[in-house]
């Protein structure tokens, strides 16, 4: 529910300074092919760049700190390959399973850092989910690499996730890699912008039709900002201000019923300041007191607008619905 800036399309435009003076444990193999045509030469270059992309993504992912076995790394790479090839995506997973996978990785990291004798394992389903999540969160799948390059990316990822430092051979190719990826990023950005604009027009129209139907419900109110809401339980005591922090349970869905977030599924309520969430959510919770329950129906301009997080269930122009339960109100920012 916190405001999320649009993630960079290009995790892979790594600074050369960040890679200087390094050796490699392993590095993606670079075949010295002699192409017969310009087309095959371009294909070979793309495959090499795809492998470097996977390598650098794996390296920067910090997998070495988890002290994973080669078998475990291969399972993460399998998730990466399936996501890039389009045979499986993180959206296919239960959000609770994704959160559990992150929790397993965090638990293992904490135990290793603390030098504990018992180091928690990360199961194979969680490892694969982490691979899928890597592709979704880094924008790796939006750079125009088709299924034919999924194996090369996974191969590079396996090598990079096993390495502690960048191979000098990879370092030497960074200028060419950055130029190649810059071109890819610009093309992907232009395509995403065009697709986003088209999706926004369609989704905003669907939202207007949805809100027109809400007018038939006498229990739904409309604020000056355009927020629609239904108070199920007004709660008790004063209502929070936008500078207050709150403890809240919530479930977020699209107007077609698709769930994209739920504190209930995570098994714990969330704490945040109301001026640090999307406008409609913050405003809506000022309508009830502690113990209150409310349903918020927010047009896209009160949610994530036309710039939601890439790869998520929320698309440009989507209207949102939140079922909220306000548990506690605390004046000022949440405790650190």
Image (tube, helix red, strand yellow):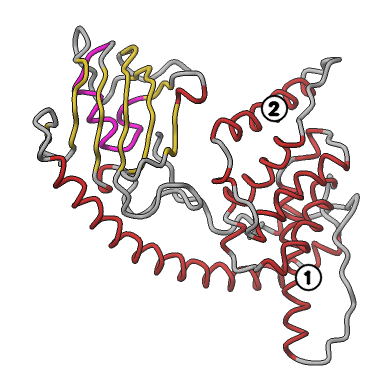
Q: Quadrant of residue 290?
A: top left
Q: Quadrant of residue 81?
A: bottom right
- Mark 1 or mark 2: whose residue is earlier in sequence: 1
User: Does the segment drawn in magenta span residue 29?
Assistant: no
Q: Give coordinates of residue 309: x percent, y percent.
A: 45, 48
Q: Which residue is mark 1?
A: 48
Q: Give coordinates of residue 325: x percent, y percent.
A: 32, 19
Q: Residue at x 40, y 34 (%)?
A: 1
Spatial CA distance of label 1 from label 2 is: 33 Å
Judge the density around disc 2: few (<14), some (14-19), many (≥20) Cα neighbours within 10 Å: some
Q: Quadrant of residue 102?
A: top right
Q: Which residue is mark 2?
A: 104
Asked if residue 61 is positioned above or below residue 282 in the image, the reply reads: below
Q: Residue at x 88, y 52 (%)?
A: 24
Asked if residue 118 is positioned above or below residue 42 in the image, the reply reads: above
Secondary structure of the residue carrying numbered label 1 = helix
Q: Nearer the viewer, residue 73 or 161?
A: 73
Asked if residue 318 is positioned above or below residue 250 in the image, the reply reads: below
Q: Give coordinates of residue 205: x percent, y percent.
A: 23, 57
User: Does the segment drawn in magenta span residue 279?
Assistant: yes
Q: Give coordinates of residue 332: x percent, y percent.
A: 32, 17
Q: Nearer the viewer, residue 317 or 277?
A: 317
Asked if residue 249 is positioned above or below residue 210 in the image, the reply reads: above
Secondary structure of the residue carrying numbered label 2 = helix
What residue span does the magenta drawing correspond to?
273-290
């Amino acid at each position: 529910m916190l405001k999320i800036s649009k993630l960079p399309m290009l995790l892979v435009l790594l600074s050369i300074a960040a890679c200087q003076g390094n050796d490699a444990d392993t590095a993606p193999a670079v075949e010295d092919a002699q192409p017969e045509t310009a087309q095959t030469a371009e294909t070979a270059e793309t495959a090499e760049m795809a492998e470097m992309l996977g390598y650098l993504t794996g390296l920067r992912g910090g997998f070495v700190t988890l002290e994973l076995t080669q078998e475990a790394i291969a399972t993460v790479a399998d998730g990466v390959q399936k996501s890039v090839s389009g045979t499986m995506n993180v959206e296919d997973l239960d959000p609770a399973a994704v959160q559990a996978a992150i929790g397993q990785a965090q638990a293992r990291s904490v135990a290793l850092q603390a030098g504990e004798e018992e180091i928690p394992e990360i199961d194979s389903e969680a490892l694969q989910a982490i691979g899928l999540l890597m592709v979704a969160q880094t924008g790796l799948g939006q750079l125009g690499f088709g299924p034919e390059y999924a194996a090369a990316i996974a191969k590079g990822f396996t090598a990079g996730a096993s390495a502690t430092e960048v191979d000098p051979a990879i370092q030497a190719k960074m200028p060419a890699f950055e130029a190649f990826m810059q071109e890819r990023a610009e093309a992907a950005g232009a395509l995403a912008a065009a697709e986003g604009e088209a999706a926004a027009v369609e989704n905003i129209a669907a939202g207007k039709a949805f809100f027109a139907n809400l007018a038939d419900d006498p229990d739904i109110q409309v604020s000056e900002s355009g927020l629609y809401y239904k108070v199920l339980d007004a709660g008790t005591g004063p209502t929070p201000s936008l500078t207050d922090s709150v403890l809240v349970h919530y479930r977020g869905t699209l107007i077609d019923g698709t769930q994209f977030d739920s504190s209930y599924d995570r098994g714990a309520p969330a704490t945040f300041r109301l001026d640090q969430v999307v406008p409609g959510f913050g405003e809506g919770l000022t309508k009830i007191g502690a113990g209150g329950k409310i349903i918020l129906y927010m047009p896209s301009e009160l949610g994530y607008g036309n710039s939601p997080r890439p790869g998520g269930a929320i698309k440009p122009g989507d209207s949102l619905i939140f079922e909220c339960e306000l548990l506690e109100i605390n004046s000022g920012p949440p405790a650190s």
